[in-house]
């Protein structure tokens, strides 16, 4: 299955639809164990403390959340650790919601900017840690995205945490070209990271499956966000056995 490039307009519409249809977040957060009002993605609640530990943040450290969306995960981690969050995403709509969410969650000092995973606009060596959840598959030039993460991180032990899905079989054409090429270990190694560990998280996939199973039963009527949620559920249920849920951590030497 080929992958079409998803534009900033596409993502703005995706987030605007979710904002207009609270049922999507209600179903997701209930199965993922997240607070009902958190604007987040498909990572479950138990991922948050694990990722926080792996980022090794000190209070005041700069945490960059790349392709942050509405920044639910970055904000929870910044609040728990005392880190200062910088979120970057192509969607101005998502970043508007991220700003409101930062204020609602009482996270001070968070800032957000429009930018691309391959060109964040952040200065060299300006981050103590980088987080990128469920988005490293999107750039057309994956090595450029891994290189950008390395560029913005300070050398000498800064950490990166990525979550994504990898194909069980890279040649399986039932999966999109975008997913088939995801290789977190190779991407991180190619950008010069060390201490790379990539582990599977089947329990996260179980939580995600529960989201899609309920979403697939929803009659979307003429609501475009519900139609998108329903369609994503049907496609995802066809593919869950073909992918692995993965967490990658690494160090910038
Ligand atoms: C599946 S969402 C994940 C959002 C967030 N990280 C989370 O886990 O909730 C993918 C995000 O990647 C962003 N995105 C897609 N392509 C991007 C790119 N090339 N550069 C920056 N952000 C991108 C989208 O706008 C969207 O917010």
Image: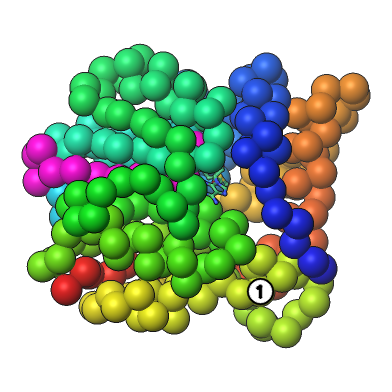
Q: Which residues are magenta?
A: 58-69
- Picture colour scheme: rainbow
Quadrant of the image containing the N terminus: bottom right
Q: How many marks?
A: 1
Percent from the top left, x then y, of residue 37? 47, 21
Residue nearer the viewer, 173 or 213? 173
Which residue corresponds to the image point at 81% horizontal and 44% vertical from the top-left?
231
Q: Residue 151 sits in which quadrant?
A: bottom left
Judged from this view, the residue extending furthest toward the right is 221
- Mark 1 Cα-neighbour bin, 10 Å: few <14, some 14–19, many ≥20: many
Q: Which residue is mark 1?
A: 180
Q: Is residue 188 magenta?
A: no
Asked whether the viewer can see residue 156, the reply is yes
Residue nearer the viewer, 106 or 207? 106
Asked whether the viewer can see residue 39, the reply is no
Percent from the top left, x then y, of residue 117? 46, 53
Asked if 200 appears above or below 109 in the picture, the reply is below
Quadrant of the image containing the C terminus: bottom left
Which residue corresponds to the image point at 48% horizontal and 21% vertical from the top-left?
96
Asked if 109 appears above or below 156 in the picture, the reply is above
């Amino acid at each position: 299955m080929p992958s079409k490039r998803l534009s900033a307009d596409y993502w703005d519409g995706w987030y605007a639809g979710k904002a207009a249809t609270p049922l999507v977040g209600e179903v997701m957060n209930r199965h993922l164990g997240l607070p009902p009002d958190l604007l987040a993605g498909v990572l479950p609640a138990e991922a948050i403390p694990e990722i926080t530990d792996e980022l090794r943040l000190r209070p005041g450290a700069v945490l960059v959340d790349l392709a942050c969306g509405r920044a639910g995960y970055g904000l929870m981690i910044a609040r728990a650790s005392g880190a200062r969050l910088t979120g970057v995403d192509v969607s101005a709509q998502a970043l508007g919601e991220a700003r409101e969410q930062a204020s609602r969650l009482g996270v001070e000092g968070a800032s957000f900017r429009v930018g691309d995973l391959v060109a964040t606009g952040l200065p060299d060596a300006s981050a103590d840690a980088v987080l990128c959840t469920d988005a490293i598959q999107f750039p057309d030039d994956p090595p450029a995205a891994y290189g950008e993460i390395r560029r913005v991180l300070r050398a000498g032990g800064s950490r990166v945490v990525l979550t994504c899905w990898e194909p069980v079989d890279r040649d399986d054409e039932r999966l999109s070209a975008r997913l088939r090429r995801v290789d977190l270990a190779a991407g991180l190694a190619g950008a010069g990271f060390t201490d790379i560990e990539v582990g599977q998280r089947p329990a996260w996939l179980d939580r995600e499956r529960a989201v899609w199973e309920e979403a697939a039963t929803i009659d979307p009527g003429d609501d475009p966000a519900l139609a998108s949620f329903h369609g994503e559920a049907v496609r995802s249920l066809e593919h869950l056995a073909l992918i692995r849920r993965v967490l990658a951590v690494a160090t910038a030497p």
